[in-house]
Image (tube, rainbow, N blue to C red):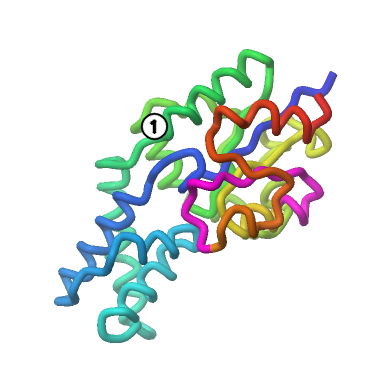
């Protein structure tokens, strides 16, 4: 029998990483003499990566950077974040509980994220949970990324799974888009960072807690 594969997005789905991303934005704004921006505003950009966070925060506080200025700010952002990415961020406890339940059933567990793989690996190591995952693939693991369906299917295969018996769990349009493009069922979490409300995403199920994951995933994979 094919082992099921459970694939998690990272930021806002598996873990609450917004505090350190917001801290990095605030550091960069202060360094450039800009005022801070509201936390809720920055959460809208988290799923899109560092570039949109920089452009959004600087656009809100006096003008978005261009050319070499943008490249410099992006480097400063990444240099600071890589040191502080696990200061306050942490996995959602219910997510870890769900992972342990699925592993006990023999499932394969993977992460498919649009975060740079270096940062994803460092966070998992800092939280001491890297061993729970059969594969972790980031924005730069392949020459394509979510919502390209290949990012998801290749992550599933890297974990040793089959896309025909897998489910994606995420919080944004890039997650649901990747799943749809890959022909994989998708569950959206209502507590994530995506700008589009979970119930407006093209998801097969919406859950408000990982306690609801097991039933939804089993139904979608026909288990």
Q: Is residue 115 above or below residue 187?
A: below
Residue name at image x 46 percent, y 61 percent: 49
What segment is highlighted magenta in the picture?
179-195
Q: Is residue 135 above or below residue 51?
A: above
Q: Quadrant of residue 219?
A: top right
Disc 1 designates what residue? 125
Note whether residue 146 is visible: no
Q: Nearer the viewer, residue 94 or 119?
A: 94
Q: Quadrant of the N terminus?
A: top right
Q: Is 20 situated left or right of 185 in this image? A: left
Q: Quadrant of residue 110?
A: top right
Rate crowding at label 1 as few (under 14), some (14 to 19) or many (20 or more) other CA atoms within 10 Å. Answer: few
Does the magenta run of residues contain 165? Answer: no
The secondary structure type at the circle numbered 1 is helix
Residue occupying the far top of the picture: 104
Note whether residue 223 is visible: yes
Residue name at image x 38 percent, y 76 percent: 55
């Amino acid at each position: 029998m094919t082992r099921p594969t459970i694939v998690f997005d990272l930021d806002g789905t598996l873990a609450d990483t917004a505090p350190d991303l917001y801290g990095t934005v605030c550091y960069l704004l202060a360094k450039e003499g800009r005022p801070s921006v509201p936390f809720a505003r920055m959460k809208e950009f988290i799923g899109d990566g560092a570039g949109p966070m920089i452009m959004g925060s600087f656009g809100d506080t006096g003008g978005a950077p261009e050319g070499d200025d943008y490249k410099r700010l992006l480097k400063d952002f990444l240099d600071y974040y890589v040191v502080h990415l696990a200061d306050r961020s942490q996995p959602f406890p219910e997510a870890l509980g769900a992972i342990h339940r699925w592993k006990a059933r023999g499932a394969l567990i993977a992460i498919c994220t649009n975060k740079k793989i270096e940062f994803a690996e460092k966070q998992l190591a800092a939280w001491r949970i890297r061993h729970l995952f059969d594969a972790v693939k980031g924005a730069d693991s392949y020459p394509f990324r979510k919502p390209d369906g290949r990012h998801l299917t290749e992550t599933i295969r890297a974990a040793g799974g089959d896309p025909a018996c897998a489910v994606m769990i995420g919080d944004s349009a890039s997650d649901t888009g990747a799943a749809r493009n890959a022909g994989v069922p998708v569950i959206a979490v209502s507590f994530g960072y995506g700008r589009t409300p979970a119930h407006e995403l093209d998801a097969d199920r919406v859950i408000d807690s990982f306690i609801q994951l097991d039933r939804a995933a089993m139904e979608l994979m026909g288990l």
